[in-house]
Image (cartoon, rainbow, N blue to C red):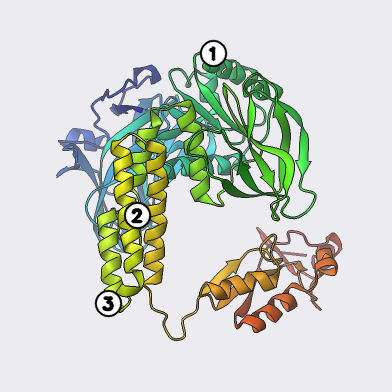
Amino acid sequence: MRWTALLALGLTACLSPTAARAGERLSSDAFSAADGAGAAAWTPFDGSGPVAATPERTPEGNPAVAFRFDMSSLQERAYWDRAVALDLSRFGRIAFWVKAEGDLSAVGHCSLYLRSGAGWYAASFSLPEEGWQRAVIDRGSFTTEDTPQGWNAIDTIRVSFWKGQPRQATIYLGGLEATASDVVVVRNTRAGREAGNYTSEMASTLARAGVEAGTVDDLDVEAGVLTGKHIAIYPLNPRPSDKEMEALEAFIRAGGRVVVCYSLSPRLAALVGVEPLGHQSSEYPGQFARMRFLPGGPPGLPDEAKQDSWNIEKVRPATAGARVIAEWLDTSGKDTGYPAVVLSNTGAYISHVLLGDDPTNKDRLVRALLGHFYPDLWEQMARHALAQVGPVARWAPYADAEAGIRRTAQSAGRLEVIENDLERTRQSQAEAEACLQGKRYPEALELASQVREQLLEAYARCQPAREGEFRAGWCHSGYGVVGLTWDETIRRLKENGFNAIVVNAMRAGIADYQSELLPVRDRVAKEGDQIALAVAAGKKYGVEVHIWKVNWNLSGAPEEFVARMCPASALVGQKGVLG
């Protein structure tokens, strides 16, 4: 379900977005130099050595190029540029093969840069410990430096290896590709980093769900990138331009479908069949704690999905065929009366951004919506899920994970403890394979999730407790888990084998307990000294309570406290001590 083109990365090669057809490949010589000519097209900087041709071949049989460097003679990094002429506006992912030799401690991290006009797109990639590895970078992972002109005008590729230790290494790169898929995530370039975070979260959810998707920009939508695609996902795009909306409306008329989260313009609301009724902030902690899915929705939906949302957009179905398929519940299970997900004939609307909590059920939600709009995706998602029941520890395929857990349990003398767990896992795996062969894909997906959970449980149960082991959970909120008291939270930790909790109870300018040094948050007067409550529960259940503090951050600090600290030279800014 993707279009693939091997980039023709010669000095003057230009790949048009309309050239990408299913299965088409164009020869490349940027990362594939069979002789010295292609390698010589790379310009080294700041003492980096020349790029060399090499007899190495990628797993696909293509030639590669070698980047050799000695970090003991380099100040900051080894890097090289190559001039190109590329239009990548239609493509959502960039992939290439990478292999490393020598002392890998020489490299702190690796970067791929693409220059467009007066700015750069930049992304990191990792090095394999051995052999060839496929690096796949979604466009949503690229950040910008200065002001790039657009993905349709890439004029330079830069490869950078940043200095780690003063050692020598060689990195082989080969087979650079750009891929265009039937499903895209639309990144909002007008809303800054926050929108980018939710774009990345959505791209990660799609990857876990086994959906081949890529990220494109809203400017690409204006230029027609959605032509021929099936589903466009808008994770946080509150103000699409008129030109973008015209392209999106044409996409819907051509049979495309759209999934929209949270903020809505009037035209976008009309497009997904809902009527906006205004913003709704949470009126009490945990008001929007989870989505409950109603009967009659698309196959594969979870019963519930946790989602610790702090506000939503109120909507109601507004077109024929539009209906609520999920509603918001609070932490007590009470129905709030607000729709969480609306399904229409043209798309779906989720009334808040999709967060990273409860990833298993978020995967189910995304799979169900995409499979409903584009049934061809079901087989792809099911096969991916069965292939990815791992990794469990260092084992990925099911057979390796099952055998590895068995060996671990046997060496720990706990094989009898997990024998029944492994038998249930084998049965679930066999049932999942049978469903896959019978084209019952939603059932296969659900069984694959069971296999994954059962393997993880078996692995956890076969681990022996070690004397003096510190088994702690982090709690980012000084007020504990939403909807639970400290007593309930620490009791549950104890019942599940934890012996400690680490609580964030203060920041640089405010405390969530009765402090003699820092201002105390108003919430303490209503809900009590949080350290005292946590420690009391810890003593009751025999769980250690440790406190951690956020430094260099005055978020929530009273203005008068900040004003008092400044003259005392107690604040540190980007340029040093303030005062």
Along the polypeptide, which appears first: circle 2 or circle 3?
2
Residue farthest to the bottom, as pictured? 467
Query: Element at badge 2?
Result: loop
Question: 402 above or below 90?
Answer: below
Relative to the observer, which residue lies in front, 478 or 147? 478
Asked if labels 2 and 1 touch by Cβ distance under 8 angstroms, the answer is: no
Along the polypeptide, which appears first: circle 3 or circle 1?
1
* Residue kind at label 1, given as amino acid type: Arg
- Classify residue 395 as left or right of residue 472: left
* Label number found at residue 185: none
Asked if labels 1 and 3 touch by Cβ distance under 8 angstroms, the answer is: no
Answer few, some or many: residues within 10 Å of disc 3's Cα (few below 14, many 20 plus, some between 14 and 19): few
Real-space CA distance between mark 1 and mark 2, rounded to the nearest whole angstrom: 40 Å
Real-space CA distance between mark 2 and mark 3, rounded to the nearest whole angstrom: 21 Å
Relative to the observer, which residue lies in front, 201 or 52? 201
* Residue kind at label 3, given as amino acid type: Ser
Along the polypeptide, which appears first: circle 1 or circle 2?
1
- Residue 437 at x, y percent in the picture: 28, 37
Residue behind mark 3: 411
For the point 68% across and 66% down, the residue is 480
For the point 73% across and 76% down, the residue is 533
Relative to the observer, which residue lies in front, 17 or 377? 377
Q: Is residue 541 visible?
A: yes
Residue behind mark 2: 390
* Label number found at residue 253: 1
